[in-house]
Amino acid sequence: MPEKYDFLVLGSGGAGLSYALRVARFGSVAVITKKDSAESNTNYAQGGLASVVASEDRFEDHINDTIVAGAGLCHQEIVEMVVREGPSVVRELLDWGARFSTKEGKLDLGREGGHSQNRIVHAADRTGKEIEETLLSAISKHTNIHVFEHHFALELITEHHLGRKVTRNDDDIHCYGAYVFDTRSDKVEAVLAKATLIATGGVGEVYLHSTNPSIATGDGIAMAYRAKARVANMEFMQFHPTTLNISEANSFLISEAVRGKGGILRDRNGYAFMSGYDDRAELAPRDIVARSIDDYLKKSGNDSVYLDVTHINKDLLSESFPHIMETCRSFGVDITKQWIPVVPAAHYLCGGVLTDRDGRTSIHGLFCAGEAACTGLHGANRLASNSLLEAMVFSKRAAEASAAHIRERSWITGIPEWDDSGTVNAEEAILIHHNKQELQQVMWNYVGIVRSDLRLERAFRRTHLLYEETEDFYQRTRVSVALCELRNLIANAYIIIRSAMSRKESRGLHYTTDYPRQVDEARHDTII
């Protein structure tokens, strides 16, 4: 018999764990995570959570900053809702035990690119880790929440599995749970749920250089897409402008907050070049900073620019950025005396599974929150530190909507067992590894910070070949995490490329040399 839970949560980042805490009083909860429960994009978030909590700050200012950064695609009503609900989720995190940085008894608020006020609630430079540990601690006290580590969600269960033909024009699709692969027992089980939340994070691994952990393979977005859910704005991939450019560092992220504290971007001769690109210089939104660095590197022929913080008080650096200081020092860079070599890397996806204001997707019983979702908050470019804010607000709203939803749902019957008949164990791991490397290289070269029609067409052709090879391999072999992740990465790459090809303008994070200006007629979401 399939396992049954009132709520099924796919992913164990901030969105998934906070949702689980909120719905636990309404029924049983299963949290599915493919690694250890603490391994998530949330855990790696350095900057913080943007919220209007200072007396001198105003909701209107945060709303305006968000809309300006979003380059005309933010949904005004969503921005207003999220910003105004921000202080309540900060209080909720504090009630759960989060220990944010304080100064003289008040929250020590940082400032990052694109913000007009200091409003970044943070825990030094490990805010995501603090939130993740706080939520895990709270969950450990709940007998109603069951966390399944080393379990991988393969497919969402819909009418398709009951024999009904499902199309993208079908507005009557229901989610009944998911098929889940236990990587330790090597078995696939159906896990049924009255409400399912996708909180699987972003797609950073689709690119060669990424600030994301290796788990960021867009599994939830790919599953939702295959289940015929609507997906939107996938062309808007945010590239973080400053990651440590030392090969062994794996694109370690140098937080936006470092520039907020006064860090200056220089070339190797010491020239501070950002003022030549934008009047806000280092405090310009990150898409402008990333594109400026990319342009400067191409013009100069250098492989790094440098972030200079040597003029900042050592005690302030140590207090604000202990993790960054320690990591840079481990790679031979003393940031109090030496400039930090940096380059851009893929960082955050502004698109995802399309939701309404309560986290509902176009599939009944399926909700989505966090980086996997496209809520209308970010538009064409995310304002720094709005991601943790969005995750917390939408997980709360999705939890309320899910609790109401399950009262109207009864259990489905007749769900078939996972069928792997006729498949064999994979013996060609090299194919998976090679295809993933090729995909990442193609996406980095042709669908990166700067795009063109020619580059996108090349990427589409090469990605289609990878899709055919991988899909044939998938049909012939038993499931493995590596193979399923590759399959999901290819699906996400396809959606990103098609979305980018359909946008005949440059807006926010999507910049193409063939259409370098914004076009009013293109001021709409790209819905797949």
Image (cartoon, rainbow, N blue to C red):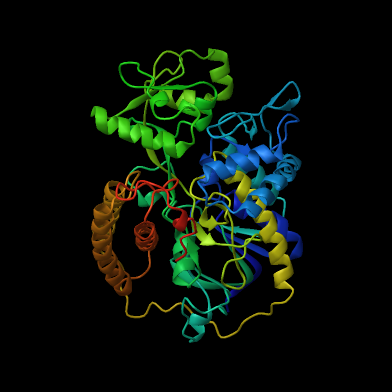
- Visible residue check, residue 152: no
Q: Residue 6: where, in percent of width, then height?
A: 67, 69
**Which residue corresponds to the image point at 65% horizontal and 80% vertical from the top-left?**
411
Q: Quadrant of the N terminus?
A: bottom right
- Visible residue check, residue 20: yes
As drawn, 453 above or below 241: below
As drawn, 214 above or below 101: below
Q: Residue furthest front?
A: 520
User: In the image, is 355 to the left or to the right of 108?
Assistant: left
**Which residue corresponds to the image point at 53% horizontal and 77% vertical from the top-left?**
158
Q: Residue 486: where, in percent of width, then height?
A: 35, 59
Q: Quadrant of the C terminus?
A: bottom left
Q: Residue 322: where, in percent of width, then height?
A: 53, 24
**Which residue corresponds to the image point at 54% horizontal and 57% vertical from the top-left?**
373
Q: Residue 184: where, in percent of width, then height?
A: 46, 61
Towards the viewer: 401 or 98: 401
